[in-house]
Each structure stands twice: as structure tokens, then as C-alpha cells.
Image (cartoon, rainbow, N blue to C red):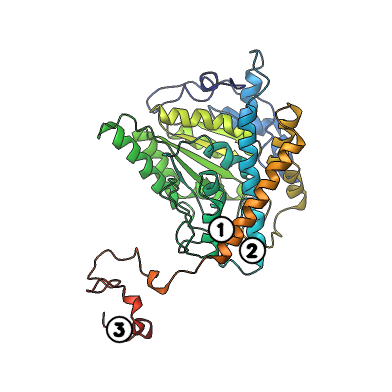
Amino acid sequence: MATAFSAPKFAAQPFTTISPTSQHKPLKIPTAASPFLGSTRKLLRLSSSSQLNLRRRSSGSVFAVSDVVKEKKPTPIPSLLITKEEGLELYEDMVLGRSFEDMCAQMYYRGKMFGFVHLYNGQEAVSTGFIKLLKQQDSVVSTYRDHVHALSKGVPARAVMSELFGKTTGCCRGQGGSMHMFSSEHNLIGGFAFIGEGIPVATGAAFTSKYKREVLKEADCDHVTLAFFGDGTCNNGQFFECLNMAALWKLPIVFVVENNLWAIGMSHLRATSDPQIYKKGPAFGMPGVHVDGMDVLKVREVAKEAIARARRGEGPTLVECETYRFRGHSLADPDELRDPTEKAHYAARDPITALKKYLIENNLSGEAELKAIDKKIDELLEDAVEFADESPLPPRSQLLENVFADPKGFGIGPDGRYRCEDPKFTQGTAHV
């Protein structure tokens, strides 16, 4: 089914005029006030200034999806952006992500999980909008807020929950925990605890795809990599270095900024000289797009073209998804720094509620069908918790696995047995 702005039409606005070598003219810039960049009284005053907004818009060559839609008003378009099957898939994935994180909070406060646990509530439109468009062979590189990315990529809820419980049945056999989800089977390449860590890894994964296709002549290798990271990361050097490399080599990668407006307790508007992250894309010769990250359908349309560009060999795209987390930075954060008015504003724009309303109003689904999905997810998560709780803890012998490769090294003895199996090892008297 055709969508409201199909890939070729959509590409004509922010994408096709930009390349690392072309001398492109800026697109016509709308002067309507931006609906983005915060919601407190102070931020609203900032965004309502038409003069400031015009100055921001006039320096870029791409703009928000809402403006793209305005530009396309003269062109007749279909009224529906998705089919029923697509809508139900999006809804189920978003409900899974939200419900999973709510269950994590319960288990954390019951003492089933340890360390820092960062929840994704409120940002589901970004994960679902992008990852559900990928092939199995495509790669995803996440951050410490990685549970929902793993679920969207197909990692079973049992495996993710068990990993959070530190059990052997987890996707990393209990050794990764909340911030280090990994699954080679699903091409989920982490989970990284430090901001910016994953971007070079994602750039390397994209280089691997290009190398296989162009050097090893694997014609069917059109694999794409998604690199997820937050607004706080965009002031780090690795971000700029990798944007440069990806543009220089035209790598098949999409840089997805999950701009939830806060880097722990630091407001994004106070931490960067130019809060419009998407404008950094054209500076490196790649498209930069700003999209409402609370609307899964808008995210999905931008994601379609960005992923298609990468798959066609046209290089990287920087996408800034402006979203909001409904909980504190982590479950250890009392979330007292953000203005209650701001939190209420974004809570009223809940992406799951918005999609549900769209499905019902457009006769794509009904309350009963959606409630059946909710019930299905509840049962799935009850099963995941029970499975994780009953799964065994890792044995002591697993402690040094995947640390040393040399069979004569510290971790493995000459007899092939792991050193930590020797009782003297933990007593500090083992000969090593």
C-alpha cells in the first residue's frame, strides 16, 4: 500500500540534493514555528519566537517531517500511512516495549535485578519505527537504554529478562546485564554503558557490509546498520569522527539520535551551542532530518527513506528523533530535576495512545483486538519473569570465559580446565 509520502517523493525534499561532493542549494525553508525543542514555559517562549525560529531554519537544508507534509499539500495523497497488518505489528511491538520496562521496574524494586537499570518508557516510537523495518541481517547498535531495542530486533523476552536477572539463559548468559544486551543471532551488537562507545562499533559494522559487497563481491550483501544514541552523546568527539568517516566512505549506516532533551540531569538546551542536532549532518555531507519522535508513523516514514538510501549505497543519514522518557534517567533517579509541566506535556503525547487512536479512528482495528494484544503481552511477560526466576545462576567456572583465548594463559590451565574451577584460585594460592 502506498504511504502518505512514498520513498521517491519524500526523498526529493531532504535527501536527494545532498551528497559529499555536490554543491547543493538550500531548500526553501518554512517559517512556521517549530513544535519541537522542549515544553516548559521558558522553552515555549524560546520556540515561539518567529525571528529565532527563522534563523534556526534558514541555516539548514533539511527540516522536520511536519514541514515536509506542509510542502506536499498540493499533491493528492492516500489517507492511510499503514495497512492493518503493519499497524498491529507496530502496536504490539510498542506495547511489548512499554510493558517490559514496567515489569523491569517491578522486578528491580523486588531485588531481582542489580546495578543501574535505564528504562525506555515514552521512546517506543523510535525503536519500533526504525527497527521493525530492518532485515534479520541488518545490525543494531544500542546504548545503556537497550532492552527495547533488543526486543524490537527479535531477541525473545525470556532471553532479555533472564539477562537482567543475571541468569545463564540470558542472551549473554547472565554476564552482560541491563546495559550490555548482545545477540549475534539477531545482529544486536550491544548495549554500551558509556555514551559514544557504540558509534565507532556501528561504523565498523557498516564498513563490514560495504567491504563484503565491494571487495569480496558479495552482491547480495546490502546490510544496513542503525546506530542509536542520545542527545548528550552528540557533543562527544566519537560522534563527529564517525560522521566524517561514514560520509567519506558512503557507509550504509543511519545515525539515530534519541533526543529526549535531557542528558541525565542536564538540559539539552544548556549543553550544546546549537540544540538542533540534525543540522550537523549536512556539515559532513549527509542528510540531516528532524522528526517528531513521539509519532511512530512519522518516524517510520523517515526511517524508510534513510534505510533505503543506505541499502542503495547512497551513504549515511543523521536522523534526530525528538522524544521524551517518562521515567528518570535510571531507576535510581528520583526524577526531581525536570519541570512537572514539561513531563505532563509529553505524557499527554504518549506514542502508544496516539497510535491506538489512529488505528481505531481509521478503522484499522478495534478496542477488542487491541485489548487482546495487551493480554497477549501480559501473558508473555509473566512467562518471561517466571522463566528468568527459575533459571540457574552462572557457575563460577564461567567467570573467565571469553576473557583469555590462550589455552596456556591465566584463565585456562594446561589441562584445558578453567583456573577458577580450582578451589585454590579463589583463595589466592593457585599457581598461575
Residue indicated by mark 2 = 107
Mark 2: give few (<14), some (14-19) or many (20+) Cα within 10 Å.
Answer: some
Asked if residue 276 can be seen in this view, the reply is no
Q: Secondary structure at mark 1?
A: helix
Q: How many marks?
A: 3
Disc 3, SS: loop
Q: Quadrant of the C terminus?
A: bottom left
Quadrant showing the N terminus:
top right
Location of residue 112 by image quarter: bottom right
Q: Which badge, 3 or 2, is on the more N-terminal residue?
A: 2
**Residue, disc 3:** 430
Mark 1 residue type: Met
Q: Amino acid at mark 3?
A: Ala
Which residue lies under the disc numbered 1?
A: 161
What is the distance, in whole Å, between disc 1 and disc 2 at their CAs?
A: 10 Å
Determine which quarter of the picture holds residue 70. Answer: top right
